Every structure is written in C-alpha cells, then in structure tokens.
Image (tube, grey):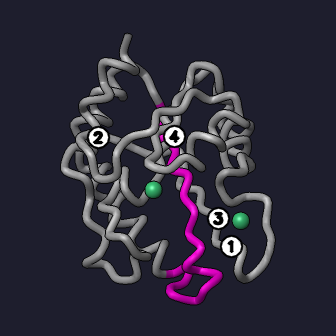
Amino acid sequence: MQKAIFLDRDGIINTEIGNYVTCEQDFQINPSLIPFLKAMKALDFNFVVISNQGGVAKKLYDHAFLDKIHQKLINLLSKEGISLLEIYYCPHHPTVGKCICRKPDSLLLEKAVARYKLNAATSWFIGDAQRDIEAAAKAGVKGILAESNSNLTLLIDKIGK
Ligand SMILES: [Mg+2]
Ligand SMILES: [Zn+2]
C-alpha cells in the first residue's frame, strides 16, 4: 500500500499572510517546500494537498482563481520532478452554510485514502492549525503541527525514522 504526506496549503505550502490569498502575488511558495518534498519522495511518499478555502463561499475568489494558482504550484513542482496526487479543497464556510468536508472534518482525507488506496497508518498530515491535526486523527493519519511558514526540512528526521 502506498503512503502519503498530506499537506495543508496556507502556512505550509505557501506563506500564511494572515488573510485569504486572493491574488497571485499573495501565493508565495515556502522556500523549504521543494527540498522537503524531494527528501520525502526519496522515501517513497506520495503527496496530497488538503485545504480549507472558505473564501470561495465568501465570494472573495472563485474556483477559477484556485485552479490558476494551483496550476502554478503544479508547474513549479513538476520542474523539480515532483507531482501531487491531488489538491483537495473545501470551498465552504460555516458562515455561509454547513458542510462535512471542511477540516477538522476528515472527508477530504478519506476521499484521498480511498481513491489512491493509501495506507493511513503510515501516512502523515502536516498542518499549521489544530484542525489539521484533528482531521488527520479522525482519518487515522499521524499529524505534525508545524509553525506557520516554518522550515519544513526540520521535519525530515521525524518522518524519516
Ligand atoms: Mg494553514
Ligand atoms: Zn466543505
């Protein structure tokens, strides 16, 4: 069975700016992301992004905007020989309506596990919010709570051993 690193987006993949990312210039990739993913790829991990994007429900940006910046990320990673299995995001927000896919719920993680036949027990979730870790726990995935915008390569030893 395949194993995966699940990654939160804002604060892990790109800079947490303290607000919604609503324009391309706000989407700045964490400089440690690529070295981290390369090290994890060498250990045979797959990668899945799981993100809350309530700004869609709030009409701060739309699916097309997310597609555009996510494609930018995919292109950047692909130049480095890294691919993502999928970028899953919840477009809902509790102020607009209820859903069951927003973290700390684990539906998106479970979707990924089922679709790509991943082994939850040997997979990890890296997030910068408690709700990331809660979602991981519900899906049986080990969680690592990282500081926002921190150096991800510091996690290599913990995951690699
Ligand atoms: Mg985050
Ligand atoms: Zn949702």
Which one is closest to the eye, mark 1 or mark 4?
A: 1
Pointer 1 with pointer 3, Cβ within 8 A: yes
Instruction: Check mark 1 vs ligand 2: CB closer than 8 Å? yes or no.
Output: yes
Placement of the N terminus among the 4 image quadrants: top right
Instruction: Check mark 3 vs ligand 2: CB closer than 8 Å? yes or no.
Output: yes
Q: Secondary structure at mark 4?
A: strand
Which residue shows up at 57% across the image and 63% down it?
A: 52
Q: Nearer the viewer, residue 148 or 65?
A: 148
N-terminal-most mark, 1 or 4 = 4
Seen from this angle, which residue lies furthest bottom? 59
Pointer 1 with pointer 2, Cβ within 8 A: no
Q: Is residue 34 magenta?
A: no
Q: Estimate the x, y position of residue 100 in percent, counting from the top left.
A: 79, 59
Reading the image, the residue beneath label 4 is: 6
Reading the image, the residue beneath label 3 is: 90
Q: Could you tell me how far apart the alpha carbons at marks 2 and 3 are, in whole angstroms? A: 27 Å
Reading the image, the residue beneath label 2 is: 81
User: Exactly how many numbered labels are in the figure?
Assistant: 4
The magenta span reads: 46-64
Q: Could you tell me how far apart the alpha carbons at marks 4 and 3 are, in whole angstroms? A: 15 Å
Which one is closest to the eye, mark 2 or mark 3?
A: 3
Reading the image, the residue beneath label 1 is: 92
Q: Label 4 sits on what residue type?
A: Phe
N-terminal-most mark, 4 or 2 = 4
Q: Label 1 sits on what residue type?
A: His
Q: Could you tell me how far apart the alpha carbons at marks 1 and 4 are, in whole angstroms? A: 20 Å
Which one is closest to the eye, mark 1 or mark 2?
A: 1
Asked if residue 27 is positioned above or below residue 37 in the image, the reply reads: below
Q: Could you tell me how far apart the alpha carbons at marks 4 and 2 are, in whole angstroms? A: 18 Å
